[in-house]
C-alpha cells in the first residue's frame, strides 16, 4: 500500500474478507498506511457474513440447488418409493440447505444451527414411511456439509436405507461445486451493481472528508472508516466492522443470529408435519393514559 500509494480499499469477498478487514483495522496503530477508508462488499454463496441478510452469489447458488433438486426428483418419476439425500455446501451456515429445501419441497433439512439427534432422524424416517403410503412416493432430504461430524451423509443414507427397507430405497448425491452456479442470476446482477455503486459513493465521500491538505494525503483512523456494506431487511447499511465483532461466531464462521431460521417451521408444515408457525414478535401491551386538560383550562380555552 505504501509502494503504490493506495488511498482506499474496496474489499469483495466472504468471511475471509471480513477477517481481513478486521486484521487491517487492528494493524492501523502500527502502520499508518492502513489509515485509509475501507469498505467490504459481501460476496459468497454461503451467505455467512455478519451484518448482511444476503450476499452476492447466494441467490445464484440457490437457483442451482433448486434446479438440481428438481431434476433429481424428476429422475424418480418412473420408479416408485425413492428417497434422495442431498448434501449442500455452505460450511457451518445452513442457509443453502434450509432455503434450498424450502424452495425444492424437501421433507427435512439438517443444519448445524439446529442440532438434531437420532430421535429426529427416526421421526423423519417414520414420516417418510407414512408418506410413501400416499400418492406422493418420493422423498427429498437436504444436509448441510458440516451439520454434524458424526451424522454424515453416508451415515444418514445407510440409516434411511436400513429403516426404509421394503418401503423405499435410497440414493445420495453430493452436489459439490456445481451448486455455485454458472452465470449470475438477475437478482445477483442487480444487487451487485447497486451495492458496488453505493460503496464507491461512500469511498468518494470518505476520501474528501479524510484528505489532509497540509500533508497532501488521506488519513482516516476512525471506526466508521472501516465498514461492511450489508443488506439489513430492505436497507443497505454501512456498519463499522468493530461493531459486528460481537455478532459473530468466529469458530464456526457464522453470525450468531440469522433471520432465515424463522422460515424453517414452514418447511415442516409444507412437508405435512404436525407443527405450528408463529412469526409474531413477542411484546407487552401498555396501558395508554391520555392527559386530559383540567376543567378550568378547558373553560378558559372556550
Image (spheres, rainbow, N blue to C red):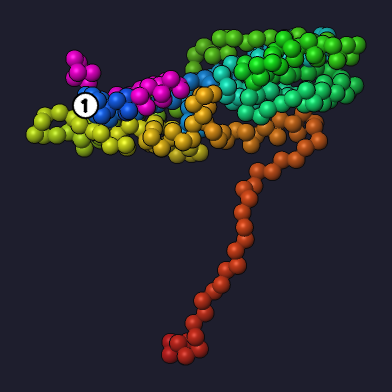
Instruction: Name the image quarter holding residue 34.
Output: top left
Q: Is residue 42 magenta?
A: no
Q: Residues within 10 Å of mark 1 (few under 14, many from 20)?
A: few
Which residue in the structure is indicated by mark 1? 32
**Number of callouts:** 1
Q: Which quarter of the rendered picture does the N terminus lie within?
A: top left
Nearer-the-camera pick, 113 or 229? 113
Report the side of 92 relative to 44 (left or right). right
Chain part drawn in magenta:
1-23
* Residue 302 sits above or below residue 102 on the image: below
Is residue 21 within the magenta segment?
yes
- Frontmost residue, 233 versus 258: 258
Residue 29 position, x and y percent, is 25, 29
Placement of the C terminus among the 4 image quadrants? bottom left
Q: Quadrant of residue 238?
A: top left
Residue appearing at x 15%, y 28% in the figure = 217
Please name whichever residue, 287 or 104, is drawn nearer the observer in this view of the structure.
287
- Residue at screen point 52% across, 20% down: 45
Q: Secondary structure at mark 1?
A: helix
Q: Position of residue 105 (x, y in %)?
A: 72, 24
Amino acid at each position: 500500500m505504501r509502494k503504490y500509494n493506495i488511498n482506499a480499499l474496496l474489499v469483495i469477498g466472504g468471511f475471509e474478507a471480513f477477517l481481513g478487514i478486521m486484521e487491517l483495522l487492528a494493524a492501523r496503530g502500527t502502520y499508518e498506511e492502513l489509515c485509509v477508508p475501507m469498505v467490504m462488499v459481501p460476496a459468497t454463496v454461503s451467505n455467512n457474513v455478519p451484518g448482511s441478510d444476503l450476499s452476492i452469489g447466494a441467490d445464484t447458488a440457490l437457483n442451482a440447488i433448486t434446479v438440481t433438486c428438481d431434476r433429481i426428483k424428476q429422475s424418480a418419476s418412473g420408479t416408485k418409493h425413492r428417497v434422495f439425500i442431498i448434501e449442500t455446501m455452505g460450511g457451518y451456515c445452513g442457509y443453502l440447505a434450509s432455503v434450498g429445501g424450502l424452495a425444492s419441497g424437501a421433507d427435512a433439512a439438517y443444519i448445524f444451527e439446529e442440532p438434531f439427534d437420532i430421535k429426529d432422524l427416526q421421526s423423519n424416517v417414520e414420516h417418510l414411511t407414512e408418506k410413501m403410503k400416499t400418492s406422493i412416493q418420493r422423498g427429498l432430504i437436504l444436509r448441510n456439509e458440516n451439520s454434524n461430524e458424526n451424522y454424515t451423509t453416508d451415515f444418514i443414507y445407510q440409516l434411511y436405507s436400513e429403516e426404509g427397507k421394503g418401503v423405499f430405497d435410497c440414493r445420495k448425491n453430493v452436489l459439490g461445486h456445481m451448486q455455485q452456479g454458472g452465470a449470475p442470476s438477475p437478482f445477483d446482477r442487480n444487487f451487485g451493481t447497486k451495492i458496488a455503486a453505493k460503496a464507491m459513493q461512500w469511498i468518494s465521500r470518505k476520501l474528501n472528508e479524510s484528505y489532509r491538505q497540509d500533508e497532501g494525503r488521506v488519513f482516516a483512523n476512525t471506526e466508521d472508516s472501516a465498514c461492511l456494506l450489508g443488506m439489513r431487511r430492505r436497507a443497505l447499511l454501512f456498519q463499522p466492522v468493530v461493531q459486528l465483532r460481537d455478532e459473530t461466531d468466529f469458530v464456526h464462521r457464522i453470525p450468531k443470529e440469522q433471520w432465515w431460521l424463522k422460515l424453517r417451521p414452514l418447511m415442516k408444515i409444507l412437508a405435512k408435519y404436525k407443527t405450528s408457525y408463529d412469526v409474531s414478535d413477542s411484546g407487552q401491551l401498555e396501558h395508554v393514559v391520555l392527559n386530559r386538560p383540567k376543567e378550568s383550562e378547558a373553560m378558559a380555552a372556550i
